[in-house]
Amino acid sequence: MLTNPSAKYRPFPAVPLADRQWPNRIIDKPPVWMSTDLRDGNQALIEPMSPEKKLRFFEKLVQIGVKEIEVGFPSASQTDFDFVRMLVEEKRIPDDVTIIVLTQAREELIRRTVESCVGARQAIVHVYNSVAPVFRRVVFGMNQDEIVQIAVNGTKLIKELVAQHPDTKWGLEYSPESFSTTELDFSKRIVDAVVDVWQPSADNKVIVNLPSTVEAATPNVYADQIEWMCRNLNQRENLVISVHPHNDRGTAVAAAELAVMAGADRVEGCLFGNGERTGNVDLVTLALNLYTQGVHPGLDFSDIDAVRQLVEECNQIPVHPRHPYVGDLVFTAFSGSHQDAIKKGFAKQQADAIWEVPYLPIDPADLGRSYDAVIRVNSQSGKGGMAYLLEQEYGLELPRRLQIEFSRVVQKHADATGGEVAAADIHALFDREYFNQENAAYRYVSHRLVENSEGEERVQIDTTVQHNRVTEPHQGTGNGPIDAFVNALGLDIRLMDYHEHSIGSGADARAACYVELRLANGPTLFGAAIDSNIVTASFKAVLSAVNRQLALSAEQAPQQAA
Ligand SMILES: CC(=O)SCCNC(=O)CCNC(=O)[C@H](O)C(C)(C)COP(=O)(O)OP(=O)(O)OC[C@H]1O[C@@H](n2cnc3c(N)ncnc32)[C@H](O)[C@@H]1OP(=O)(O)O
Ligand SMILES: CC(C)C(=O)C(=O)O
Ligand SMILES: [Mg+2]
C-alpha cells in the first residue's frame, strides 16, 4: 500500500503583515554578536569541553572581538559553575566584554545562576521558558496565564537577587523559547509582562531574544515574525531585539540575515554553526557575508584557520570541507573553466581595488588563507589549472598553445590514476615529456657560433649532437642561431613559433625556451628546454620537439601497419 508520510505534517501559516518593510532594507551595520559556544550541555558535544578548553575558547572569542559571551549554564553542573567563578575571580573578563549565564525560570536554578556571577564587573542573566502550544500542552501541562506567570516570577526573583549585589552592572535577557512556533500575540504578551517587571531604560535595555528553537518555516516567515514583534512590543526603544536561529531546515544564516533586516539588533550563534541538532546559526558565515557586502563585521577572522583549529579541537567536531569561507575546498577550483577564470582574475586584480576575481566571493588572503591551494588539477581540469601551478611553483610560463598541448598529457595521467594531480606530479610529467625525454633520439652536446665576417648577415654554426647514442658533428648557416642549428641538423623542420623567458634573476638566472615546429608532414608540436645559456636552451627546445615528433611517429607506425 502507498503511504504518504507528508500527510503527518502541516504547512506553516503565513504571518499577516501586508506592508512588511524588511524586503526593501539592506544590512549596513553589523548586529551585536553573542556567542553561545560555551553553553555546555546545550551545544551537544559528544565530549564536553574541559575547563581548560573552555578557557581557551573563551579567550579566542575575546580575541576575535565578541563582546557578549554566554559562558555557561551554571546551575546545570559544578563544572559550569566553577568555570564562571574562575573567570570572575581570576579577573579574566576584559572590561568591554559581558558574560551571560543561562537559566530556566526556576527558583533554585536562578539563585545558583546569580550566585555564579557575583563579583563580575557586568553580567547578564538569561532566563527562558518555552511558550509554544506544544510545550504548554505536552511539557508543562499549563495554560497561557500559568506560562506567563513562570516568566514573571523568574524575572521578579532575578530582579530581587541582583539588587543585593549592586557592585555588578546586571542585565536581563529573556527568551520565550520556541518563539517562532508560538502565536505572535502570546509572545508579545509574555515579553511585555517580563519587560514590565524589569522596568528597563534606554541605558539599561532588556535583551528580548526571539529564538527559532526548532526552525520550522522559510526564513521570510521568521523575518515577518521579527518585524511584527519590533512593531508591536511595548517599550521597543528600551529593548535589544535579539535572534537565535537554529538550522533544522538548513536556512539559519538566511533567517538571521532577514531577521536583522526586519529589525533585530543582535544575533546569537556559534562559530561554524555548532549547536544542538543541526546547530545554531553560524556566526562566522554571517560575519563574513557582511564583509563581502562592504560592511566590516567588527569581528577579526584574519586568521580563520587558527580559529577553526581551536574550535575543532575544543568541540571535537570537524568543520566540513565545503563550509563557507573556511572549508578546505572552498578556495579550490577543480574544473578547468573555473581555474582559467580564476587565473585570469588574479592576474588582473589590483591590490586595494574592489575584489573581482571570478568564482571567489572573498579574497582568501583577507582570511589569512593562501593562494597556493586555489588551483588543483584532476581529470576534469582544463589547461588553466596546470598552467597556474607550473607558473606559481616552478616559474614556467607556458605559451597558450603549449598549455593546450600539455593539458592532454596531464588529462591522460589523471584519467589513468583517477585522483588529483599535485603540482609536483605536473612538473614531473612536463619534465619527462619535454626536458628529460626517455629514449630521446637526439641529444644536444655542444655548439660554437662562428664569428660573423664583417658585413655578413648569416650566422654559421658548428654543433655536436648525439643521434641514437652516436655523436655526430654538424655545420650549418641560417639567418639566426636557431635557423642555423635547424639547417645544420639537416632535417625537414619548419619552425612555427618561439617563446622565451627567464627564470630567477642575477647569476642564477636561467632561460626557458619553447619552440613549436613541424617535422616533415607530422603534426605541429612543442619542445621546451631550460639552460643557463639562452641560445643553448633554444637548441635543446628544438631537439625536444623533434624527439617528440619522432616518438609519436614510432608510436603510430605499428598502428598504421596493422
Ligand atoms: C533550547 C535550549 O537550548 S534550552 C537550554 C538547554 N540546556 C540545558 O538545559 C542545560 C542542561 N540542563 C540540565 O542539566 C538540567 O535540565 C538542569 C540541571 C538545569 C535541571 O535539571 P532537572 O531539574 O533535574 O530536570 P529538567 O531540566 O528535566 O526539568 C524539568 C522540569 O523543569 C520544568 N522546566 C523546564 N524548562 C523550564 C524553564 N525554562 N523554566 C521553568 N521550568 C522549566 C519542566 O516543566 C519540568 O517540570 P516538572 O518536573 O514539574 O515536570
Ligand atoms: C535558551 C534558548 C534561547 C535557546 O537556546 C533556544 O530556544 O534555542
Ligand atoms: Mg538554542
Image: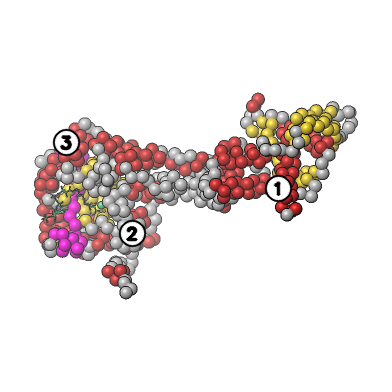
Residue name at image x 24 percent, y 45 percent: 39
Q: Which kind of residue does numbered mark 2 sit on?
A: Arg
Range of magenta residues = 116-140
Q: Is mark 2 within 8 Å of ligand 2?
A: no
Residue name at image x 77 percent, y 29 percent: 446
Q: Is mark 3 within 8 Å of ligand 1?
A: no
Per the image, the residue denoted by label 1 is 555
Question: CA separation, marks 3 and 2?
Answer: 41 Å
Residue name at image x 67 percent, y 36 percent: 436
Q: Give the mark nearer the N terminus: 2 vs 1.
A: 2
Q: Position of residue 152 (x, y in %)?
A: 13, 55
Per the image, the residue denoted by label 2 is 249
Question: CA separation, marks 2 and 1?
Answer: 58 Å
Per the image, the residue denoted by label 3 is 119
Horizontal side, residue 150 vs residue 283: left or right: left
Q: Residues within 10 Å of mark 3 (few under 14, many from 20)?
A: some
Q: Would residue 177 be visible to someone looking at this image? A: yes
Q: Position of residue 320 (x, y in %)?
A: 39, 48
Q: Position of residue 169 (x, y in %)?
A: 19, 41
135 or 381, which is in the foreground? Answer: 381
